[in-house]
Image (cartoon, grey):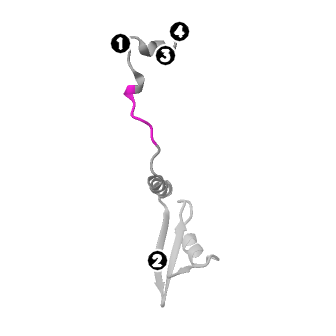
Amino acid sequence: MRKHENFMNEPDYGYIDLEACFDPIFEPPIDFLEECRKRWENRMNPFTGTVERKIGNTWYLLETVCDGNEPLTHKVKRLIFSDKEALCS
């Protein structure tokens, strides 16, 4: 097998330079990676939702996850009687 230095100094006999076939590799910007991560997380579970509701003079921010196996009546009960505190704005 020929050494790399000798091979590169030889005249071109029709070999293909594989390094010339590829684009240079670079690291994408951090903000682009963050945006992609957020979109991917939202895409992974399309049944995640956040809803704002006004009851009286208070706004509630309800966040829920539905896996598709829970009946609607159980989901509504879980949202209404949740032991988690509601976020008010």
Which secondary structure class fits the magenta region best? Answer: loop
Above or below, 26 relative to 29:
above
Q: Does 83 appear in magenta?
A: no
- For image coordinates 53% across by 9% down, the residue present is 1
How crowded pointer 2 is (Cα within 10 Å; few <14, some 14-19, many 20+) is rated as: few
The disc placed on residue 68 is none
Secondary structure of residue under mark 1: loop
C-beta proximity under 8 Å, tags 4 and 3? no
Of the residues tagged 3 and 2, which is closer to the observer? 3
Highlighted range, magenta: 20-26
Residue 31 picture location, percent across and down: 45, 56
Residue 24 in the magenta stretch? The answer is: yes
| Circles 1, 4 touching at the beta carbon (< 8 Å) | no
Residue 52: assigned label: 2
Residue linked to disc 1? 12
Task: Between label 2 and label 1, give the one nearer the viewer.
Answer: 1
Q: Is residue 54 left or right of residue 16?
A: right
Give amino acid for label 1.
Asp
- The earlier-in-sequence mark between 1 and 4 is 4
Q: Are marks 4 and 2 in contact (CB under 8 Å)?
A: no
The CA distance from mark 4 to mark 2 is 70 Å
CB-based contact (under 8 Å), mark 3 and mark 2: no
Of mark 1 and mark 3, the one earlier in the sequence is: 3
Percent position of residue 17, x then y = 39, 21
Kind of residue indicated by mark 4: Met
Residue linked to disc 3: 5
Cα distance between the residues tagged 4 and 3: 12 Å
| Amino acid tagged 3 | Glu
Q: Which residue in the protein does label 4 denote?
A: 1
